[in-house]
Amino acid sequence: MSYLEVRSLHKRYGAFTALVDISLDVGEGEFVCFLGPSGCGKTTLLRAIAGLDPQTSGTIRQKGRDVSALPPSARDFGIVFQSYALFPNLTVADNVGYGLVSRRQKRAEIANRVTELLALVGMPDAGSRYPAQLSGGQQQRVALARALATSPGLLLLDEPLSALDARVRLRLRHEIKALQRRLGVTTIMVTHDQEEALTMADRIVVMNQGAIEQVGTPEQVYRTPATAFVADFVGAMNFLDGTFTAPDCVSVGRVSLSCPPQDGLASGSKVRLCIRPEDVRVRDLPADVSNRLSVQVAELDFVGAFCRASLHADGMALVADFSSNLIRDLGVERGRSLDIALPPDCVRIFAA
Amino acid sequence: MKLARDDLVMRAGVLAMAAALLVMVGLPLWSLLAKGFEDRDGHFVGLANFLVYFSTPALFNSALNSLHVAAVCTVIVVPVAFLYAYALTRAVLPLRWLFQAVALIPIFAPSLLPGLALIYLFGTQGFFKSWLGGGQIYGFEGIVIGQVFYCLPHAMLILGTALATADARLYEAADVLGASRARVFFTVTLPGAKYGVISAALVVFTLVITDFGIAKVIGGNFNVLATDVYKQVIGQQNFSMGAVVGLVLLAPAALAFAVDRFVQRRQVALLTARAVPLVPRPRPGRDAFCTLFCIIVAAGILVILGMAVWGSLIKYWPYNLSLTWANYRFETFDANGWDSYFNSLTMAVGAAVFGTALVFIGAWLAEKTKGFWLVRDLVRLLAFLPMAVPGLVLGLGYIFFFNAAANPLNFLYGTMAILLINTVAHFYTVGHLTATTALKQIDPEFEAVSASLKVPIWRTLARVTAPICLPAILDIAIYLFVNAMTTVSSVIFLYSPDTKLASVAAVNIEEAGTTAAATALCVVIVATSASVKALHLVAERFLLGRLQAWRRR
């Protein structure tokens, strides 16, 4: 039995449908990311799970208990908002202990727990300071400590890192993930940052227009995107429009490309052929390599660790990522002709 | 969806607020409306009263007079206030704080005060009577001068806010593009303050139309709507006609209010989070002109105030100018003596304490309750309504509603409580808006966090929300206090011999012909409300410094 079961959840605001038939399972101790563009319904889903914006229909069960109709205060979760929502007039210690005071615990117990939590998030000496005196990253940690103070079974994070600058964000990613693993608390994080989702999540729920597009491990979502939307949203991707000619063959312009065998696509139907820029092969092409193309390097953009090349061939345009080594070894430069291959096992086909 | 205990308590609270505001605002106004369609004996007569009103030139002329005075005052006050506010916000002014403080003085005075001061200056025995060249101050001119004094701070505050929120980047862009100063003024400054100007004009127009004190003291035979209501009700005991005049008075005020709401809705935030505040840089010509202008305006205000103070201390104007405290022995002029002052003080403190609590908790409930839209909207509507209702009209509504024999709340009539309730109701809107603005600035997720931590919502109100809003709460309390001290219009129908207020006593004393004592009473009121405001400023410094250490970064 999974820890959190969401079944056919719908959410409507008047004529607008924010969530369409969402069903989802989250295992105990799992770290799940809701990923999608803004307005895709990921935050709405999180708030429905918290009970803050109740669903129109559908059920939510937490640890076997039906919580669908319960107000937030009767559910078991801790939450960190994008704004952190720290109480500005209370000290860090009072913020962290806020949920403990009303549980009628002894003053000393509360103080101990607060000290423990502040140590946990790496801010042991900040107890007497006010939120306004802390940096964004520090405020984020305090908010996390406050959410964890009552030892909730479920931790909800609503874009917790998006208000921070890049360097802090990178460090906190690892810290939050490590903390989550240590405590084993079931966690759901909402983010629009695919890199964040890929590095932190055990599983990613990719959402678009109020519906789930794909649920899978970061590897699955990246390697085998279930839909064209996922392929496009997660990572960089080339899309080539073509026509399906045989079970393992697509014609793009005047070129015929082979692909993994497809079921359920009629011959002659319009398709989109996808391949990631880093999967375009250049080196050591065997003579009989399939999907060989002669291309011209139209543009070469230096991105740091690698170069992104825009390639033109037979009216086809695609981009490929070349390492610095490769560029040096093969003398790739703007205007040069190259032979490349699109390995069939790296190619994905979606109905257009 | 099951409701948490918090939600149930809050819904009950919103319902109670709606009921309270219905009693305080909605039902009295309804009673007034009904009364306008009844004859003296309470029979429904349709539009008969209105036909009489519009076919009686003496009555109808007052409406035209009111509109005339209000239009002229608006045309004078808005440019003066604009220039004054511009000088305060955009020029480098010596003693800026002093000019700001002087311009606010009229707010702390009952509107009788400028009228009385003008009598001393230009009245039949006035110092400068000869300046009028045979004309007299009683009537149109007197009302206009008095109203300009009285309305200036209100317009200046609105325009000051509008001009203070400027984005320096726009001015830099205009400079870089080589725009002339005049062009910058007409393309950047004025459009930025456009809504402020409209708002200020509407506020001045409404204040003039609805004010009672100035017209009462210095209007002479020049009748306006506000004095007509008073005459019909107090003089002739003709309540139905009083209600009709009240409704006529309500129309322009309500219209101005509606226009203002409509215009404000179109306003978009000009000042984004990324805006760079404009810091005025010295520019000798402009600064000298602004300083001179401010000196002239401030001098005008001080002359009127100073005249009132001096006049109140003079033995027998204009024959014996030696000084005396005799005019402050109020017991020799009015049966209530100083009691009316202490009544005012009691009422003002009560309004500040209970009114602020009601306004803040009401705004909080309307803002934070989940769902329950219909009742929350009703509360918001009733909280907005008083802004559009002149005090005299509300006071009249109170007579009709609370004095009705069938009303179980009848026992309130003639008590201090009804004065307090009426005053809080009359000035409800500004407090409500202040509280709502403060509450909207707070992170909306505080309540969600409390719910997730299973902390009752009232605890978060007491420990977090209210402390954060403390400056706004103090503002509301001071606003209610000052207005309770100075208001005449609405309470003039509601006092009993035991609960007479200082401002009402001043009207009565003036009616009896003792200008000096009436002025003395007004001076005591100004001194009280201005001191309380000064105390507020000191307290705010202290609070922000000590209790609110968390605001410091």
Image: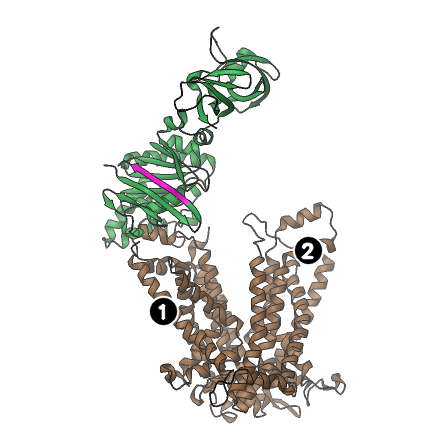
Chain colours: A green, B brown
Any magenta on residue A21?
Answer: yes
Q: Quadrant of the N terminus of chain A?
A: top left
Residue B353 appearing in the image = no
Q: Left or right: B386 with respect to A106? A: right
Residue sitting nearer the eye, B179 or B490? B490
Q: Are marks 1 and 2 in contact (CB under 8 Å)?
A: no
The kind of secondary structure element at disc 2 is loop
Q: B51 above or below B79?
A: below
Secondary structure beneath label 1: helix
From the viewer's side, name the closer residue of A233 and B163.
Answer: A233
Q: Main secondary structure of the magenta part?
A: strand
Mark 1 and mark 2 lie on one chain; the one further toward the N terminus is: 1
Does residue A106 appear in the picture of this structure? yes
Residue drawn at (47%, 67%) of the image: B381
Q: How many numbered discs, if any?
A: 2
The disc label shown at residue A276, or none: none
* Crowd around label 2: few <14 · some 14–19 · many ≥20 (10 Å): few
Q: Chain of mark 2?
A: B
Q: In which quarter of the view is residue B343 placed? A: bottom left
| Left or right relative to A317: residue B21 | left
Residue B125 image position (x, y, % from top left) = 68, 90
Q: Residue B58 at what x, y percent from top left? A: 64, 87
Q: Report the residue at 40% width, 21% height from top.
A: A262
Q: Name the residue located 37 percent from the left edge and 33 percent from the top edge.
A: A204
Mark number displayed over residue B16 = 1
Residue position for label 2: B282
Q: Residues within 10 Å of mark 1 (few under 14, many from 20)?
A: some
Task: Please state which amino acid type lies under the numbered disc 1.
Answer: Ala
Name the residue furthest right.
B133
The amino acid marked with disc number 2 is Pro
Looking at the image, residue B218 sits to the left or right of residue A38; the answer is right
